[in-house]
Amino acid sequence: MASNKITTTIESGENLNIIGPSGSGKSSYVNALIGLPSMLKGNIIIDDINLKNFHSNQWWMMRKKIIACVFQNLELFQNLTVADNINIVTGLYKSINESKIDFIIESLNLNPFKNIKAKNLSLGELQRLAICRALVRPFLLLILDEPFSHLDKDNIQKATQLINQISNDNQAGIILTSHSESQDFSFDKTIVLQ
Amino acid sequence: MPIMLSSLSLFLGTFICVISFFFLSFIDTSILFSDAKDKFYIVSKDISFLHTINKNFLNINDHEISDLTYVRGVKRVGKIYSSEFPCRIFLSSNINYYSEVFLESLDNQYLAIDKTGFNWDPSQNKIPLIISKEFLHLYNYSFVSSNGLPVLTEKTAELLPLSIEVKGNSNRKQYKATIHGFSDRYLSILVPMEFLLWANNYYAGKTKSEIRPTKLVVEISENDPGPFLDYIEKNNYVIQNNKVGISENIKLIKVIIIFFVFLGISIIIVSLFFIYFSNQLLFEKERENIIKLQLIGHSFAFIRSQLLNRSIVAAIITLVSAFSLGYVGIIYIMNQAGNIFEFENIKLRIFIVYAVITISFLLIIYITNRRLKIRGVF
């Protein structure tokens, strides 16, 4: 089990890179931030509120309005089509720009797969779908938990470009976990886990 | 499948409750609290050999009345006075019928029917009467066949021209009489107290202070008349309108119906648990998807409501069907039973109770299912 003692502070809109080998505890940070059970010991404080003291409604509001996440295991609905996997998120928000959604789908080359069920997609296509699902909705913090592990170079470049653009539009920060330092984003802080 | 099974058992339980509750309401409203089976007891002295020699033993004095008033459960005691003069009643139409009768009277507050107009003053030649229903039954079932007389209902009897002949103290007079109403409580012909006291004085020469009541009407405030009945037995009184036997039978019927109510409630509780556990199973089955939905911003309350809609709708349909079928069943029973059940009197009450039960069940389903949780995400 990984044992890293870290204290850090990030401001709104700042980017953080968490680097470490497999099993170093990167996903524990992500899980703790998103409200999943985590091995993490210690405190995460957002706007003077300890996440440990969050009640279910606060977690819901945080997941709905603040944090968008691309999970390492994607968390997609395998029996739904690509379009439905996106709609299930966009349906939560009253005013979402349809052209923006089309632009994101187009940028990630998901148009040909719109009516295909997720279970019939390759890992790379699924990963692009997970990125798409995180970007189509409003957010202030984008958590990317090893989001490019199954993407080729070209797709990584397109995805990072899109992520940067949408995050800037939203004036949102990014937390990226990866095995090595990423050159695709400009980070304000980096945490290296052993 | 689990929803269907639980709906079926919910339907069965509710249907049993509906029908049982109807009978329970009927017993409570129509039997226990009716004129005939209320908590009024007519009490008199027990007749022994001594009383046949000295009839004054039958009189009940103020001290004895006072003692009776203090018995636990006794709410109030009223004196019943009897006529001390000979009296005859005539059917003064083409029905040629008369009978020797006695008259009785008591304070109007102890009457079980509408008291308006049940009074008399000496300038009045017409006397209102309250007659025991038993007398009407006796007339219809005994005298009619043997004397070729017409059968009378309460309404037609009230229209009959009657007269009462009273004599004594060298006086004789025939008064017109009207039937004010029929009573289950008193096995007697009741006249207004004003008339009886006046007539006892005029035709028998006895003032009110000289007349002792031989009967009392006692109202019992408690459901358990035990102490009162003990007192009656120990002090040589008898109850003339003894409803204890009937009460015991009613109690037995009530126990049986209550058993069915509890059976219905038990089935309902089991089916509610069944609904709860089938929903819990559904949650466990969909656990992974529920967590995914929560992670992308859906609230657990919304997800839960979507999953529970099915069981809530099933419960509503089941309850409405059970109540509707129960109601149809009750109407059928009413039609079969004729006018025995005074359904109109309790219809509103039954509807209110059913509405409360339905809303309660739905609330129970809603509240218990709100407790459904999924582990794995905060």
Image (cartoon, helix red, strand yellow):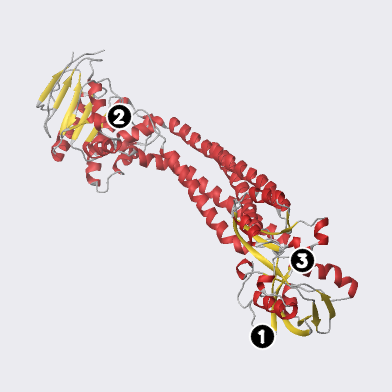
Residue for point 12% across, 22% down: A190
Q: For residue A125, which numbered disc appears in the image?
A: 2
State which chain disc 1 sits on. B
Q: Look at the image and tell me whether residue B352 can be seen.
A: yes
Q: Nearer the viewer, mark 3 or mark 2?
A: 3
SS at badge 1: loop
Query: Which of marks 1 and 3 precedes in the sequence?
Result: 1
Residue for point 64% across, 43% down: B259
Residue of label 1: B124
Q: Disc 3 residue type?
A: Glu
Label 3 in the same subunit as label 1? yes
Query: Is A86 above or below relative to B97?
Result: above
Query: Is B259 above or below relative to B97?
Result: above
State which chain disc 3 sits on. B
Q: Which of marks 3 and 1 is in front?
A: 1
State which chain disc 2 sits on. A
Q: Disc 3 to disc 2, how far (Cα)?
A: 93 Å
Q: In which quarter of the image is residue A162?
A: top left
Residue A98 is left or right of residue A174, and the answer is: right
SS at badge 3: helix
